[in-house]
Image (spheres, rainbow, N blue to C red):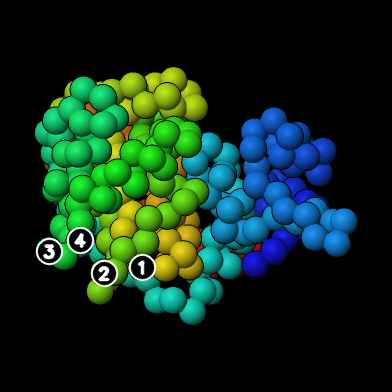
Amino acid sequence: MQITIRQAAGYFGVSEDQVRRWIANRALPVHRANERLHLNAIEVWEWAVERGIPVSRSLLDEARRSPDAVPPLLSLLSAGGVHRDVEGNDKGSVFAAIVERLPLPQEVDREHLLAILEAREAMGSTGVGQGIAIPHVRNPILLHVDQPFVALFLLRHPIDFDSIDAQPVHAIFFVVSSSIPVHLRILAELGFALRDPVLRDLLRSQADTESILSRIGGLATATTAQYRTHPS
């Protein structure tokens, strides 16, 4: 789905000049065709989530209308699990611990996955702020899995992640999907949930798994009810 700079400004609720400044100064991806600039909706959403910039729910709704069926975030996290006391004192050692714990099929080459993950991270930090990181946000690593999932890793010790707000990271969400549309929809749901300050506090305090999952389930229920009552 391609959008114009004017449409992007509408999704963000800012001026077209602000969008152009983001393109020039903050690497908002843009493409040129027939002497005109356009943006890719997938890249716009991922760029916004990566930097913690609010986007209109209408773009989320577009993702929800994707033909690829994706379970709710609560189900995705239940499948991927909440992993605690993840060891590591830098990105490399933490990524190694994460790849080792991921519930992946036996045939997946974990060493190759780790190498890709580290290479992608070298292109730019995936720390999205507030002590949270979502590895390979902009460039999804697609794996041959029967069902997508999201795994949450709570670090034993917060580490420097070169995040946009310079805060050390204590929680990492790892998205596993088999296609870009599925990745987009999962990322949309996750990005929306992480705007919630209560959820962020639960992650920061490393609350029990039941409390974290309960909050995520409640957010999904509240969002659905609000959308049905006030569609936009």
The amino acid on which the numbered mark 3 sits, given as a three-letter code, is Gln
Q: Which residue is mark 2?
A: 145
Residue 125's image quarter? top left
Residue 1's image quarter? bottom right
What distance separates the C-alpha of mark 2 from that of mark 4?
Answer: 9 Å
Q: Position of residue 36 (x, y in %)?
A: 85, 56
Disc 4, SS: loop
* Tag 3–tag 4 contact (CB < 8 Å): yes
Residue 108, disc: 4
Rate crowding at label 1 as few (under 14), some (14 to 19) or many (20 or more) other CA atoms within 10 Å. some
What distance separates the C-alpha of mark 2 from that of mark 3?
Answer: 11 Å
The amino acid on which the numbered mark 1 sits, given as a three-letter code, is Ser
Q: Which residue is mark 1?
A: 178
* Tag 1–tag 2 contact (CB < 8 Å): yes
Disc 1, SS: loop
Q: Position of residue 94 (x, y in %)?
A: 22, 33
Q: Which residue is mark 3?
A: 106
Mark earlier in primary sequence (1, 2): 2
Q: Position of residue 205 (x, y in %)?
A: 23, 29
Residue 91, disc: none
